[in-house]
Amino acid sequence: MVAAVAAVAWAWLAPTPELEAGDAVEVATAALDAAGVDARVDPDPARGRYTTSAGEDVDVWKVLAEVDGARISLWVAVDDGLPVLLDDRASGGDGQVLPDAAVRAISEHRANPVRDRRVTRNLLGTLAAVLLVVVAVQAAARAPRRRPRPT
């Protein structure tokens, strides 16, 4: 019973792993879909680093996509899956590829498939541990009690 509780606590307290390449593609695809953008997302993103305006370095996946014959780039944070940069400049520098509403929707998109899988796994583990504890308590309550023999 103690082992079940310890395992559940360990699972919830462990840090969430970083996004892998496939996770970043999933995040970018979901963000573009949520923004209503019909895009072909490159399945092979590159690792990189983005420096915020505050000077903070953020490890990212640089996910490329093709939209209406133009190439855009969505940089997704490795640690939490948030979009940190969208480069949708049109070729030749004439405006942007995506409409402002799509850019806003992408920047507001929140998805982290690694965290979502972890939460699902931990919820199932917690449920299993609770069931194990309930069964153990019921078994202990129904077990015949031995009385000490008189001497």
Image: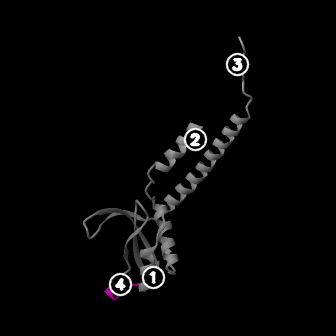
- Check disc 1 and report the residue beneath it: 102
- Determine which quarter of the picture holds residue 103: bottom left
Q: Which residues are magenta?
A: 92-97
Residue under pointer 2 = 4
Q: Give the residue type at disc 2.
A: Ala
Question: If you read the primary sequence from the N terminus, does the residue marked by circle 1 or circle 2 appear first?
Answer: 2
**Mark with earlier residue (1, 4):** 4
Q: CA distance from mark 3 to mark 1?
A: 76 Å
Q: Residue at 47%, 84% (x, y): give it.
A: 68
Q: CA gap, disc 3 to disc 2?
A: 32 Å
- In this rendering, the answer to whether 10 lies above or below 112 is above
Decide: marks 4, 2 in contact (CB < 8 A)? Answer: no
For disc 3, the marked residue is 148
The vertical placement of 119 against 82, above or below, is: above
Mark positioned earlier in the residue sequence (3 or 2): 2
The residue at the point 55 percent across, 42 percent down is: 5
Q: Find out whether the residues at labels 1 and 2 contact each other: C-beta distance under 8 Å.
A: no
**Camera-nearest residue between 23 and 79:** 79
Amino acid, disc 1: Ala
Other residues around mark 1 within 10 Å, as few (<14) / some (14–19) / many (≥20): some
Q: Secondary structure at mark 2?
A: helix
Asked if the residue at tag 4 contacts the one at tag 1, i.e. Cβ–Cβ closer than 8 Å, the answer is no
Would you say 1 lies left or right of 104 here? right
Amino acid type at mark 4: Ser
Residue 42 visible? no
Query: Is residue 25 covered in magenta?
Result: no
Query: Residue 145: percent from the left, percent from the top?
Result: 72, 27
Front residue of this view, candidates 146 and 62: 146
Q: What residue is pinned by disc 4?
A: 91
Front disc: 4 or 3? 3
Find numbered disc 3 in the image and state the secondary structure of the residue it sits on.
loop
- Residue 127, how many percent across, how many down? 62, 50
